[in-house]
Amino acid sequence: MATDHIRYDVLARDALRGVLRKVLTDAASHGLPGEHHFFITFVSKAEGVKLSSRLLAQYPEEMTIILQHQFWDLTVLEDRFEVGLSFGGIPERLIVPFSAIKSFLDPSVKFGLQFDTSDVAEVAPENLPAAPAPSALSVPAPAAEKAEASDEPSPPSQGGAEVVRLDRFRKK
């Protein structure tokens, strides 16, 4: 078999991350249109991911967040996005590099992307940077909650997040 010197796999992966970057940039500028909402799963300990030690203890391998109703300060940069979310009524600021993202799903239109993260470098727990503090001046504006873990969705709590298993949205 011929050697792929062009690296089509890398070009395709980067193009799909560009789709994700564009969608998040539009959501940061204009909010989420219609019924659109996003499930984003990422590697918790990937290099560049910043989240609180409390969240890292809850989600040591991977974490899924939902950008829908309650998120704020969504900022999209070339290599990452940053967003404010509330977890159990506690505001947090997450920083997620695009290279750490495992999947992106917009269930409102049944659109999803899967990314290979086998080459993502993980940071040892003692070397993990602390998550930035949520902006004190930020006022939550429409759009996100967190998700992950259990087989059955738990009922939403006041000001908290609903725990959802991403597999329930995948075709079986």
Image (spheres, grey):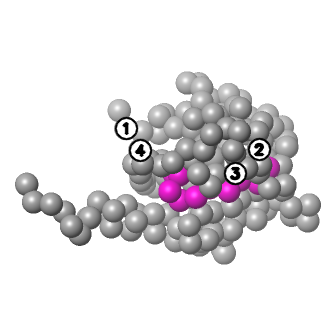
The region drawn magenta spans 92-101
In the image, which is nearer the foreground, mark 4 or mark 1?
4
Q: Is residue 161 left or right of residue 5?
A: right
Q: Amino acid at mark 3?
A: Lys
Q: Disc 4 marks which residue?
A: 118
Classify 42 as above or below 157.
Answer: below
Q: Position of residue 63 (x, y in %)?
A: 60, 40
The chief SS type of the magenta part is strand
Q: Is residue 97 left or right of residue 168?
A: right
What residue do we see at 40% from left, 65% from top?
14
Q: Disc 1 marks which residue?
A: 171
What element does badge 2 sit on?
loop
Classify 36 as above or below 148.
Answer: below
What residue do we see at 55% from left, 24% from top?
151
Q: Which mark is residue 52?
A: 2
What residue do we see at 49% from left, 63% from top?
20
First of labels 4, 1 by sequence position: 4
